[in-house]
């Protein structure tokens, strides 16, 4: 079952226009049902293996959405990024960097992309991810320009200039934490301490004007693993 329309239609047969109301109706109707009544009750309620298979397929497809957005976002940024004499050397479009160091490398730049909309609250996972990308770009030994492309930059700059402890930011990534300690020891206590010294290493660019379709959406990151 791969046709999204067929999947949707099978699911709607069960969910109806309002899933909450449908489930409440089934909960009321199932009272008193005995073993001999199950088959007819399930059929009447639209509960079947076809609906379950459709739900499982929809979940599988939904799991690919974030990776798809990441890939499309990078590719649609290229016309806005590439300069006249610039050539793509590689892009990494899947979850993680699939063996490549960054999302994009050209003859002139290396770059990472984050298509997430921050809300400005307690967003430690997103902060950790942005700091990881910034750090790896900043410390990468290359003469090429370094870019971090974000969907909005206000909250990212606030985080990078702020006082969150580096021990907290790096606590869930053993590989990154080891690299940082080996390189800097205890020279920096907070994210802001590190950024104050390395603010010029990476240019942070807002891609919202290029990707207006994502500008108001909350996009989760593809799962790249703790050290990805």
Image (tube, grey):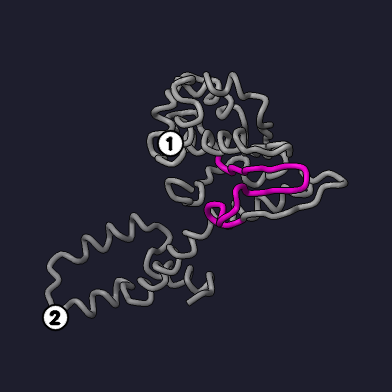
Task: Determine whether 171 is above or below 115 in the image.
Answer: above
Q: Residue at x 66, y 29 (%)?
A: 201
State the residue in front, 5 or 26. 5
Image: magenta residue range:
93-116
User: Extreme front residue here?
Assistant: 182
Q: Residue at x 48, y 20 (%)?
A: 188
Residue under pointer 2: 36
User: Percent from the top left, x then y, of residue 100?
Assistant: 60, 53
Magenta span includes 208: no
User: Percent from the top left, x then y, of residue 191?
Assistant: 50, 24
Main secondary structure type of the part rendered in magenta? loop
Between label 2 and label 1, give the one nearer the viewer. 1
Magenta span includes 111: yes
SS for tag 1? helix
Position of 121 compared to 194: left or right?
left
- Quadrant of the rendered image containing residue 46: bottom left
Task: Determine whether 56 is above or below 204 in the image.
Answer: below
Position of 74 compared to 119: left or right?
right
Q: Residue at x 26, y 63 (%)?
A: 26
Residue under pointer 1: 178
State the residue in front, 206 or 223. 223
Please tell me which of labels 2 and 1 falls first in the chain. 2
User: Percent from the top left, x then y, of residue 49?
Assistant: 33, 76
Q: Residues within 10 Å of mark 1 (few under 14, many from 20)?
A: few
């Amino acid at each position: 079952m791969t046709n999204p329309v067929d999947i949707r239609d099978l699911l709607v047969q069960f969910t109806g226009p309002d899933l909450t109301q449908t489930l409440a109706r089934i909960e009321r109707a199932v009272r008193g049902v005995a073993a001999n009544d199950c088959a007819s009750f399930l059929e009447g309620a639209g509960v079947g293996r076809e609906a379950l298979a459709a739900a499982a397929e929809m979940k599988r497809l939904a799991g690919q959405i974030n990776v798809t957005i990441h890939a499309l976002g990078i590719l649609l940024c290229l016309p806005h990024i590439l300069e006249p004499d610039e050539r793509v050397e590689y892009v990494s479009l899947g979850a993680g960097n699939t063996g490549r160091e960054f999302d994009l490398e050209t003859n002139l730049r290396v770059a990472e992309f984050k298509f997430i909309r921050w809300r400005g609250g307690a967003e430690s996972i997103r902060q950790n991810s942005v700091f990881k990308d910034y750090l790896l770009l900043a410390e990468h030994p290359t003469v090429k320009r370094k870019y971090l492309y974000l969907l909005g930059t206000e909250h990212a700059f606030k985080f990078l200039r702020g006082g969150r402890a580096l021990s907290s930011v790096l606590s869930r990534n053993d590989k990154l934490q080891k690299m940082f300690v080996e390189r800097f020891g205890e020279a920096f206590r907070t994210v802001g301490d590190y950024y104050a010294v390395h603010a010029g290493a990476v240019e942070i660019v807002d891609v919202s004007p290029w990707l207006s379709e994502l500008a108001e959406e909350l996009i989760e990151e593809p799962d790249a693993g703790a050290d990805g």
